[in-house]
Amino acid sequence: MTVWQVFFYALLTALATGLGAIPFFFLKNISKRTLALANAMAAGLMMTASFQLVNEGLQYNLWRTVIGVILGLLLIQIAQRILSSREDVSVGDLEGAGAMKALLIVGVMTIHSFAEGIGVGVAYGDGFAFGLFITLAIAIHNIPEGIAISAVLVPQGVPVWRAALWSIFSSLPQPLIAVPAFLFVSVFTPILPLGLGLAAGAMIWMSISEILPEALEDAPAPQVATVFTLSVVAMTIFQALIG
């Protein structure tokens, strides 16, 4: 394996995240209730992915994973407070609360991508076959993450094509961090559980604090809970099949 090959395969995992926006190209005149249920689905996908990250981290080191979760919780709260204290937050055409939510969801997924990038690089350090398997698994895993990002951004008024680009942007750390992780496996392997835990902590907080409350504003609680639960079930099956 060469550095450029590792970068190329890791880049494919990032591009796969943009595929998650495709279903939203076919949804026209979406009602507030439908968008609320999309938020519930996004929360379920993120919550399931979070516990999968924790489970992966525990295979490396218990306490580094736990410390990572706590750090993720603290960092996302700090980021939320800083953004909420500013009145001039804007992302493209979004301003105020919508822009803040967009920045948080993309930021959380970007943090997540650092951990996945380390995973790809470390995997290729063990050989091409294992690295390719991990690359395919993460690429497929990134598609529902793109759905989760788009399900949050599109209701805020972000065009679908731009939601796809934001999804890809959130995964760009994967090829960037995969190369040094491949070159310095012994250095990055101890960091991996910390990164996995950090991403999980931020995603759990984001799901419960920001995404679910918004879903409950425009859809009945039983429907939100049903979609949330079904998305957890679907994501669990999906992860089991690609694992």
Image (cartoon, rainbow, N blue to C red):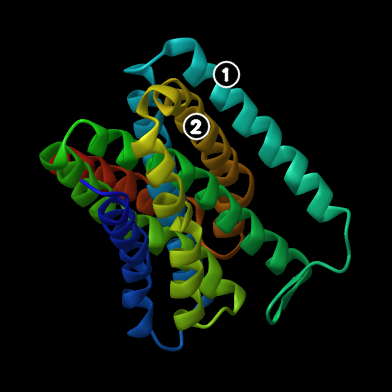
Q: Position of residue 55 (x, y in %)?
A: 34, 24
Q: Nearer the viewer, residue 158 or 199?
A: 199
Which is nearer the N-term, disc 2 or disc 1?
1
Q: Quadrant of residue 18?
A: bottom left
Identity of the amino acid at label 2? Gly
Question: Where does the image place residue 123, in percent across and percent down from the top left?
Answer: 25, 35
> To which residue does mark 2 refer?
195
User: Looking at the image, which residue is at 29% across and 50% down?
Assistant: 6
User: Does residue 86 appear anywhere in the picture?
Assistant: yes
Mark 2 Cα-neighbour bin, 10 Å: few <14, some 14–19, many ≥20: many
Q: Quick check: marks 2 and 1 in contact, CB under 8 Å?
A: no
**Residue situated in front as seen by the camera: 181 or 145:** 181
Residue at coordinates 72% horizontally, 39% vertically from top-left? Answer: 77
- Left or right of residue 182: residue 158: right
Compute the Cα span from label 2 to label 1: 10 Å
> Mark 1: few, some, or many residues within 10 Å (few <14, many ≥20)?
some
User: Height in image: 107 above or below 180?
Assistant: below
Give the SS element for disc 1: helix
Q: Nearer the viewer, residue 72 or 33?
A: 72
- Pointer 1: what residue? 67
Q: Does residue 72 sit above or below 64 in this rendering?
A: below
- Of the 4 image quadrants, the one containing the C terminus is top left
Q: Secondary structure at mark 2?
A: helix
- The answer to whether 157 is drawn above or below residue 113 in the figure is below
Please give the name of the residue rendered at 35% of the width and 44% of the height, measured from the top-left corner.
Answer: 229
